[in-house]
Amino acid sequence: MDCQVKCGKVVKVTDFTKRQELLVEINGRLEKAINFPQLTGKCQVKDEVVVNTTAVALDLGTGGTHFVMAVVGKNRELEATDGHIMKLRYTPNQGRVLSVEEEASPDHQLMKEVDSLNRIPVVVGTLHSMLAPVCLGFKELASEKKIVYLMSDGAALPLGLSKQVEVLKEVGLIEQTITFNHAFGGDLEAVNVFSALLAAKHVCQADLAVILMGPGVVGTNTKWGTSALEQGIFLNAVDSLAGQPIGTLRVSFADPRNRHQGISHHCLTALQHVVKCKCHLALPFSLKTHPLISDQLSKLHQHQIHWVDTEPYISVLENSPFELRSMGRTVAEDPYFFQAAFAAGMLAGQLVPE
């Protein structure tokens, strides 16, 4: 693995809940960088920092910023915690967390005993930008019910990178967060998707669990070379734990890439070839007679398709109190992407057990 590393001096710090956004002087130029205090400690103006500049050098989209690797001359001690589970294992940034399953956890005994989701709906998608519309759709039908977000390690590993999660928690759409595998920074930490799901139901008392990767997604313009295929793996996990698996479809007619027209090829691959159970899939009713959608759905005959009338709720998306954007596109520019995710949330609201 090749990375580009430079040194610089911090000239401005903006603090957020789980990250710091910095201006760093590097070779006489001011450049943006992100620091995660959980990894490196807090930065202050005039600190000298070592930054990974690889993403900027490669002109990446999400994640295309500098990241602080270390603050020069500052030691960090381990915080007082009983945690012994390592994330980012066997790397220079490995660190311990208190995992919800481990013996030192106050929830250890409960986690030893539970093995069922008791039929709660679980929405699983492929892009972080689906999170807000899913939550909005669910709350339209189940306003008093509790949503817990589970972040995988398919893209960003630090939950603190997500501005969306910060806003959704502030406005009460998300109650709690769980990070699993090597993702970290949630209200709870879990070792894998199975224990994360069980913790969502039995520790957090979730009425809906939503599994999505953090900001960013890995793609290679090949059928199998994408982190989006985790959708199928996680839907299988939901089914194996007696939850109700709901697959969020990535739908677009605004994406210029042919492979993402209609239902994205990533979703089709996951739902055709990776999923081994029958899932619930939701789509806006207005697409029911669309020829491309009809052709694509013919490949997903093993799943249960639900046509949701999203038209009366378009204003909810358009007048959201926070910005909705995916791949740089707004609701007006890519309406069916957001309506499909909203429909999945509404379907989940219909499937909540009494």
Image (cartoon, helix red, strand yellow):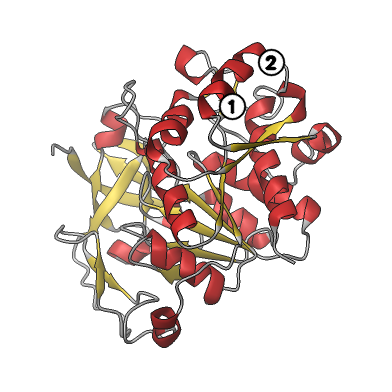
Residue hosting label 1? 251
Residue 175 picture quarter = bottom right
How packed is label 1: few (under 14 Cα within 10 Å), some, or many (20 or more)?
A: many
* Disc number for residue 97: none
Report the residue that reaches farthest toward the front: 302
Earlier in the chain: of badge 2 and badge 1, it is 1
The one of 275 and 67 positioned closer to us in this rendering: 275
Left of 71 or right of it: where is 172?
A: right
The residue lying at 58 percent from left, 68 percent from top is: 118
Give the residue at x 33% y 66%: 191
Q: Quadrant of residue 111?
A: bottom left
Q: Which residue is mark 2?
A: 290
| Local secondary structure at mark 1 | strand
Q: Is residue 253 visible?
A: no
How far across and down, in percent of the image, does residue 147 sit? 63, 61
Is residue 250 shown left or right of residue 89?
A: right
Q: Are marks 2 and 1 in contact (CB under 8 Å)?
A: no
Residue found 17% across the figure and 38% down from its top: 3
